[in-house]
Image (cartoon, rainbow, N blue to C red):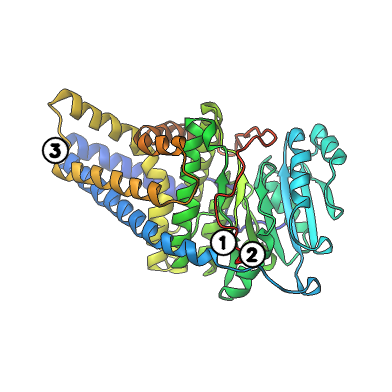
Amino acid sequence: MPAPLAAYSYRTQVSARQQAILNSLLTAMGFAGLLHPGHFAVSVSWGLLIVFSLLILLRLLLILAGVGARRLYSEIPIANSANAELPTFTIMVAAYQEADMMRQISGVLRTLDWPAEKLEIFVLLEPEDEETMRAASAAIFPATTQLVRVPPGGPKTKPNALSYGLSLARGQYVTIYDVEDRPHPDQLRIAYEAFLRAPENTVCVQAPLVATNARSGWLAAQWALEYDVQFGLLLPGLALYRMPVLLGGTSNHIRRDALLALGGWDAWNVTEDADLGMRIARAGLITTVIATPTDETAPTRFDIWLAQRSRWLKGFLQTWLVLMRNPVRTWRQMGGSQFLVMQLTLGGAILTPLAYAPFAVMVSLAIWSGHLEVGTVGLSLLIAGLVVGLLGDLLAPGRWSGMRLLAILTRPFYWPLHSLAAYRALWELANKPFFWAKTPHHPDDAERGPLYSTGSLA
């Protein structure tokens, strides 16, 4: 089965060189803090101010670019090619302990507007998961569906299952869906048209994910708003300027030949989508986006939210550590501007959750104690971050409701929760690096109604 080269996989975890550099850095910082605490505090403060200023500036630029880019990508028409001319899509759905979802996903796949003879569908199942196998066998999948047992031996992760499926795939394009996904019926046609219109080195098309149960609670509303900003503004802005894109874990459509050349997915990275997006950029290839959505259901329970967010952050750390095994080589592969954007997007996605809670505590103490001060520069940065965040929330696509308005107004109370996920991710990276926190799913109880353009001019 295809696999990334060792240098591009997290299988070997943190290298000895990285560990030595980290130990030396922590030792140097410790001595500096003890010998010159004042200078050390000032240096750290200015370093963080510069980094967070760059993060806020990049987010502002991507939001503004995303507003125009979203309209551009929403105007891709449906491909009018005759069925005989259309390529084959291999659709892969990795399922583990998902017996309750088989009936729903089988029905969803039957709604896709693509010739049946040009679809190759793999439902990838773990060998011991007999309950899901029975449910899948009883469901009415399209005729071209195969129920595939993933051989034992590898890590029990989604990318391991996908990599095995890739070894069997024969389609020109490979599409990934999750069991809870409800892609728009036109999505494959719009994705194919996007490939036809894109530069030759475009190898991936990412569709937006939309959480459709935003009214079911505060946590779901925050999640839905995050998705609207991420997939409705930030990713279109990155794709417009051909910057590295942190792929979503589903609804990406990838050229199979390029995917094989890249080594498929890293079975030892628990956020395989982000890792693949970065390897695409390292190879000088492009990811673009479309506006034709896939509906999902956001978590409504904090324990489920925490487990899933911790896994994402752990995978971001794994991806960043792989990229930084040889930063000079990564710089040369990506180019200077893409390397910087990678550090600000991927690195920022790691750094900001670590800082949210401590910064919130510091600001709260400054407000209530009357003795601590965040300073003029710190206050300006805080206001800029809140304003840019509010701007993104207001400009993001999506259905407006009282719950969405509440989510926007209470955003500052949501971000510190990410710190809990970040600290858990650090602990898991050290103690359970390949553990995959399973997210439970239930049949659709989502709100209905379109949140995005379908991408069709019709």
Determine whether the residue tagged by mark 3 lies in a helix, strand or loop: helix
Neighbourhood count class around disc 1 (C-alpha, 10 Å): few under 14, some 14–19, many 20 upward: many
Neighbourhood count class around disc 3 (C-alpha, 10 Å): few under 14, some 14–19, many 20 upward: few
Q: Which residue is mark 1?
A: 290
Q: Which residue is mark 3?
A: 38
Q: CA distance from mark 1 to mark 2?
A: 7 Å
Quarter of image, res 39: top left
Residue displayed at 61% across by 69% down:
77
Quarter of image, res 64: bottom left
Type of the residue with mark 2: Ile
Determine whether the residue tagged by mark 1 lies in a helix, strand or loop: loop
Quarter of the image for the N terminus: give it. Answer: bottom right
Q: CA distance from mark 3 to mark 2?
A: 57 Å
Neighbourhood count class around disc 2 (C-alpha, 10 Å): few under 14, some 14–19, many 20 upward: many
Type of the residue with mark 1: Ile
Q: Residue 296: x and y, percent?
A: 61, 43
- Disc 1 + disc 2, Cβ < 8 Å: yes
| Foreground: disc 3 or disc 2 | 2
Q: Please tell me which of labels 1 and 2 falls first in the chain.
A: 2
Determine whether the residue tagged by mark 2 lies in a helix, strand or loop: helix
Type of the residue with mark 3: Gly
Q: Which residue is mark 2?
A: 190
Q: Is residue 239 visible?
A: no
